[in-house]
Image (tube, rainbow, N blue to C red):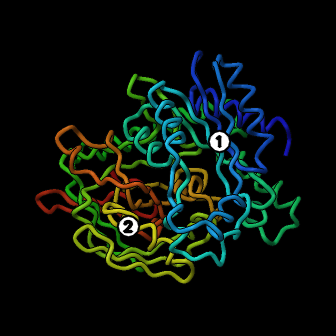
Amino acid sequence: MESATLDRLAELAVGFGANVQPGQQVIVIAAIGQEPLARRIVELVYGAGAVFVDMVYRDPYVQRARLQHGIDETLGYEPEWVVERVRQHGAKHGATIALSGPVAPGLLDGIEPDRIGRDRPPGQKQSTENMTEARNNWTIVPCPTRGWATLVHPDLEPDAALERLWEQIEVVCRVDTEDPVAAWKSRMDDLARACEALTERRFDMIHLEGPGTDLRVGLLPTSTWCGGGLTTAWGLRHQPNLPTEEVFTTPDPARVDGVVRATKPRELSGTIVRDLEVRFESGRVRSIEAAENGAVLKAYAERDEGAGRLGELALVDGEGRIGPLDTVFYDTLLDENAASHIALGQGFDWAVGDDDRDRINRSEIHVDFMIGSPEVDVTGITASGERVPVLRNGAWQL
């Protein structure tokens, strides 16, 4: 990996992704093994005028120790000082930059799925509240490591695998272009046009049909399609996900029916869920089946009252840069932007109008899984029953 690539990715994360402002407090979250990119980001954050950077390193082996040896009552326990720290970050309108990518794939294999499902990172509930209330400007960017690279490219030697993964990250993050920000702004314009077209149609329901999938997802009367960046409660634009190729909305959690088959594996808390199939009835998950580690997702879906209902429906067209690579990255940031997806758990307040805000799903979790492919047709259904093609073979029809 050339240092120039790392520099350009860090610059994109700080200046365009999180859009760090002078005078802000900033949290940078990384895992052990991601130090080079994290340190460069910290340098740039201070250069942007931040007053303080809180560098948080997470070690997956610490989570493994907690899951193996911690008493049951400690799973999900959060000391008040941790919660208060996250609460203050929201109140102070701080910025957050997080690095993604599994650094120790398979580390939690053999751990009881129920324990994995009940565990959560400290402060996660408060972080979710900060997000839904748009209190922070933030972004997540991928950071290749040797462990992640050998998972994605097992046929290559570790050094070659790491080099190949960095090459792919260059492409999907558009840092291979002369002006990555301009390239992203052009793509954001495309997503904004798709959002506008979908919102104008005011579909009552979205119908997804494909191999193993026949799912109807109801929308709320004021469901609004979003994509191409978000705006904080005080009006600052930022890009939560880099890369991002999706348009999304908050569905009606009481109106989801049918069956859906995942089109990609899902890395979830150190395990990989494969060949997932989920059945819904009257909005609630009725069954979860998978060839591997389905019990982990079942545990997540039982965490609280809203965990077994939908909080997000996202559509992805075929014009993005991730899908054409035909690579499973085992990282939600990348895989969810390669294919349409749904998410169990918390919905987004900003994706509905005031009249429907009390109807969106509430939960401590937000777990995406990919359900789209060129073989999956997406159709909008109006209140009168008219069926309108939305996506066919990965191409917008609106």
How many residues crowd mark 1 within 10 Å: few (<14), some (14–19), many (20+)? some
Question: What SS does tag 1 mark?
Answer: strand
Q: Earlier in the sequence, mark 1 or mark 2?
A: 1
Query: What residue is at 53 percent from the left and 61 percent from the top?
Result: 74
- From the viewer's perspective, tell me whether residue 81 is left or right of residue 343: right
Q: Quadrant of residue 315?
A: bottom left
Residue at 57% x, 21% y is 24
Residue 377 numbered mark, or none:
2
The residue positioned 50% from the left and 77% from the top of the image is 294
Looking at the picture, tell me which residue is in the foreground, 290 or 50: 50
Q: Which residue is mark 1?
A: 29
Q: Does residue 217 appear to the left or right of 145 in the view shown?
A: left
Residue at the (53%, 62%) spot, across then down = 75
What amino acid type should be assigned to the residue bearing mark 1? Ile
| Label ID, residue 145 | none
Residue nearer the viewer, 9 or 291: 291
Whether residue 211 appears in this view of the structure is no
321 or 301: which is nearer to us? 301
Q: Nearer the viewer, residue 317 or 246?
A: 246
Which quadrant holds residue 267?
Answer: bottom right
Q: Is 362 above or below relative to 180?
A: below
Q: Position of residue 396 (x, y in %)?
A: 40, 53
Mark 2 residue crowding within 10 angstroms, few (<14) / some (14–19) / many (20+): many
Amino acid at circle 2: Asp
What secondary structure is found at the residue carrying circle 2? Answer: strand
> In the rendered image, is residue 50 in sight?
yes
- Judge whether 48 appears above or below 55 on screen: above
What is the spatial separation of the Cα atoms under label 1 and label 2, in whole angstroms? Answer: 37 Å
Mark closer to the observer (1, 2): 1
**x, y percentage for residue 201?**
23, 47
Q: Residue furthest left?
A: 384
